[in-house]
Amino acid sequence: MNVHHKMDEADRRNRLDDMAQGVLSTPMDRPEGPLKVSGTAPYAHEAQPEGMLHGCFVRAPRLGQVTSMNADKALAMEGVHTVLHADKLLRNPCQGTANEAPVQGVRDVHYVGQPIALAVADSFEAARAAAQAVTFEITDADRNPVTPQDYETPEDKQSAQGDLDKAMRDAAVTVDQTYSTPPHNSAAMEPHASIAQWDGDRLTLRGAYQMLKYNRNELADSLGIDPKKLRILSPYVGGGFGSKLGIAQEAVGAALAARELGRPVGIAMTRQQVFEATMRRSETRQRIRLAADAEGRLSGIGHDAWVSNLPDETFSEPVTQATPFTYRGAHRHIGHHIARVSRTCAGSVRAPGEAVGITCFEIAMDELAHAAGIDPVELRKRNIPEEDPTTGKPYSSNMLAKALDAGAQTFGWDATCPAPGSRREGEWLIGQGMASAVRVNILMGSKARVTLDPDGSAVVETDMTDIGTGSYAILTQLTAEMLGLRPDQVDVRLGDTDNPPASGSGGSWGASSAGSSVFLACQGIRSRIAEQLGTSEEQLTLKDGQAIADNRSTPLGDLLNEPLESLGEIEAG
């Protein structure tokens, strides 16, 4: 049974409130917890097949072009099988949801530490020694420092309303400040790792990846194969933070080497390589302008951001994405500027945009509160809009004022807090502060299959991943609640592209999107059970393995002669 739901349809019901099992919002151990704490959960580089070879990348020590390479010394070393310098090797990982190969070809070196070849040997130690033995010539890069006129200013990333300059001139209180934030690197506990194994023209890749339905197409495109001949297994991921959203160098390198050598090949990046060659958050420079009347009500907002990335990358740190809708202000200017620089690829790193953009904007709001002599909490509450200031669309809900009040009450906020730097206890300066925090809300297309067996157990299948964020527990609780089962009666199977394609973990959309598809699949099963009982799904209660309708209680096992299967699909964009 297929249940499909398009998320632009108006649907304000919360059917979960009508369920009776009482599993949601209660504490539970993570289903996969015992495997993880005992060290028996198979992470990407741990399910090593017999005869697996090990790969280690050759890194570039400087920028330029690789004009020659000599691997003779490396190939003469014991246990070394090959040194690959292939055009299909990746310069850097894919961006999240790319769904196609990233930049390929490593002869042009765009950043220090870029992989330029791959040594493969019987052991990691031998592969590392071989990689260090490879010699090469790199011509010096002719790249000039970035100047202001070199910044790209994409038209679709700029917006303006009204006259911000006039609003600044006419305002009773203004802020015009420039802030900067440093770059960040991802460093999940599990490094980037993959094991590739070919069976004829079919490839199985065990990898540490967050978004399998995209990763499958990205890897297939990089290798020039049909995605249907590729299976990715990623049941456990030891952290991602965005760095594992897209297929990276080790997956393609392992697959190419395994195809050439006819044996499984595994690559686990070293910690140094993870820092050098995966993803960083761009450094930012942000100019923020605020114009307000004497009561602190905003009339103008300006937010310009300067960020960087490699050439040919579509991603740029979305610094200003929360600015348009958080506070009121009729006169607005949003600017976004991108420099192309020779540094590690910039991409999504935990809360891209908001982590650095909201931080600086809220600092500016504090400076406005101080200049206007208004309590920082009250200033923000006065500027919460009733509708999206950019589009005029009404909010379905806006909980910021309630959140601010709850935070102030819990903290014991003192609206008469002293000026910054004025309170001292001995050698310590003592301060207090507050800030709003908002997050864009995104839903992504997702599918899941749920099967209810006559023995009262359920199986959930989807290629959703768990990067330590609790996907197994969330989908277990949701299924148990919908079908009236104990959590230990639910078996959630994730991280396999043979399963229905889910949203993947990223963008804070995993639980809502994958969870919605599981919800719909369970809804389909509930409808089938209700049909057998001659009632509607809304009138059906499932609890403790019993189906209850019209004051009659029937064990689920008595209703099912064969497994009930349902596919739930959420379509969103």
Image (spheres, rainbow, N blue to C red):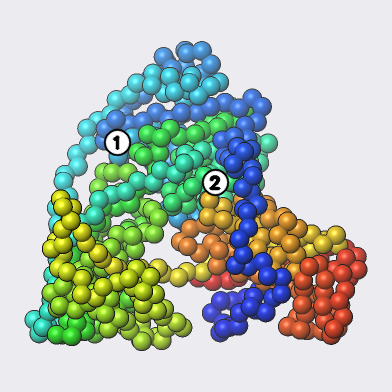
Instruction: Please say if 367 is above or below 161.
Output: above
10 Å neighbourhood of mark 2: few (<14), some, or many (≥20)?
Answer: many
Mark 2 or 1, nearer chain start: 1
Name the side, left or right, on which 244 lies relative to 536: left
Instruction: Please say if 377 is above or below 241.
Output: below
Name the side, left or right, on which 1 lies relative to 325: right
Amino acid on which disc 2 is placed: Val
| Residue depicted at x 20% and y 71% | 417
| Residue depicted at x 78% and y 68% | 544
Instruction: Please say if 505 is above or below 123.
Output: below
| Residue depicted at x 62% and y 53% | 30
Q: Which mark is residue 237?
A: 2
Displayed quadrant of residue 284? bottom left
Q: Position of residue 446 (x, y in %)?
A: 59, 65
Instruction: Measure how far apart labels 2 and 1 are at the Cα level.
Output: 27 Å
Count of numbered circles in the view: 2
Amino acid on which disc 1 is placed: Val
Task: Read off the residue under disc 1.
Answer: 112
